[in-house]
Image (cartoon, rainbow, N blue to C red):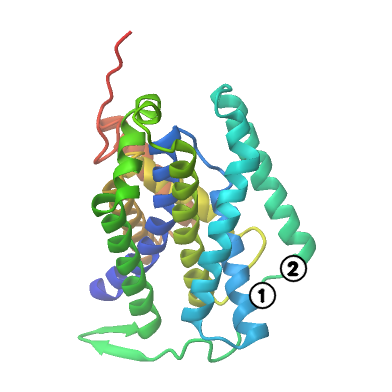
Amino acid sequence: MFLQQLVNGVALGSVYALIALGYTMVYGIITLINFAHGEIFMAGAFIGLLLVSAFKVNVFVAMAGAMVFCMLMGVIIELIAYRPLRKSSRLSALISAIGVSIFLSSLALMVFGADAKGFPDGAFPVRQIKVGTADISTLQLLIIGVSAVLMMALEFIVQKTKIGKAMRATSEDYNTSALMGINVNRVISFTFALGSALAAAGGVLVGVLFNAVSFNMGLMAGLKAFAAAVLGGIGSIPGAMLGGLLLGVSEVFGVAIGYSSYRDAIAFTILVLVLLVKPTGLLGQKITKKV
């Protein structure tokens, strides 16, 4: 059963990693924990469900539509809720993020109701592939494959493009980047758009995997993804990927050996243990400031 549980864990961890990337990118640029990010994940799932149910498009088109919608949503949230508070205290921005989170979840409750919604039958044809003693579904392979492609695309954007170079410069020194001619506002908006698109893709994948989309699905997924970002090293893109995979695999194996009642606690227990040993996370770097 090891291979079976490993595949289950990697599939779940891939989704955590997609969400965690949004947390870590935003924090790396403006040192803000965007607690509304889980609700963007939820919104992406609902948009994907709406496109599949009402417009009869396939999962890939629905995912692309959800990503575009959430990109715009992320930019608008940054413009309205965070940009006016950029020079205020971190507590003000944090309260604003929590307010946006509550607003979005309440709005979803009003629009879609409290009951979980499922994707139509045949939204994605699922087949089982026998690999040794493991039964691996094509849906799990889809999740792992799509997540891997999106992570590689993100790495390419950050490392090889002009806007990616601007993102790295802004992450290093916000004020100096502005003095050097970088449009910092555009870089921050692009970062929110990119992170929101990844969260939307994760929302659609989770919705199809568990066949359930609800107004509060972003709460626990967002907290676990935040734990993954901190575990890997907040502000580190490879760290967010690694942290997500580790949490997903640990959670699935914890359930497999009989600790299903503690499923949600496993991620946070691992986080606490790692931070006790390495406070900066697995791939995070200690930052020294001159005073």
Q: How far from the left and from the top, in percent, is residue 111?
A: 77, 65
Q: Crowding near pointer 2: few (<14 within 10 Å), some, many (20+)? A: some
* Residue 146 sits above or below residue 100 on the image: below
Q: Along the polypeptide, which appears first: circle 2 or circle 1? A: 2
Residue 112 tag number:
2
Which label sits in the foreground, 2 or 1? Answer: 2
The residue identified by callout 1 is 117
The residue located at (33%, 57%) in the rendering is 154
Q: Amino acid at mark 1?
A: Lys
Return the x and y of residue 225 as percentages of the image width and height: 44, 51
* Residue at the outermost front position: 181
- Looking at the image, can residue 262 be seen? no
In x, y percent, where is residue 247?
35, 54
Give the total of numbered labels. 2
In front of the other: 237 or 267: 237
Identity of the residue drawn at 58% across and 22% down: 88
Residue drawn at x 60%, y 55% as measured from the top left: 73
Q: Nearer the viewer, residue 267 or 97?
A: 97
User: Alpha carbon of mark 2 to alpha carbon of mark 1: how far?
Assistant: 9 Å
For residue 193, above or below residue 289: below
Disc 2 residue type (three-letter): Phe
In this image, 109 relative to 199: left or right?
Answer: right
Rate crowding at label 1 as few (under 14), some (14 to 19) or many (20 or more) other CA atoms within 10 Å. Answer: some
Give the secondary structure at mark 1. loop
User: Mark 2–mark 1 contact, CB under 8 Å?
Assistant: yes
Q: Residue 101 or 64: which is nearer the viewer? A: 64
- Please state if 269 lies on the left or on the right of 91 as rendered: left
For mark 2, give the secondary structure. Answer: helix
> Residue at point 46% right, 42% down?
188
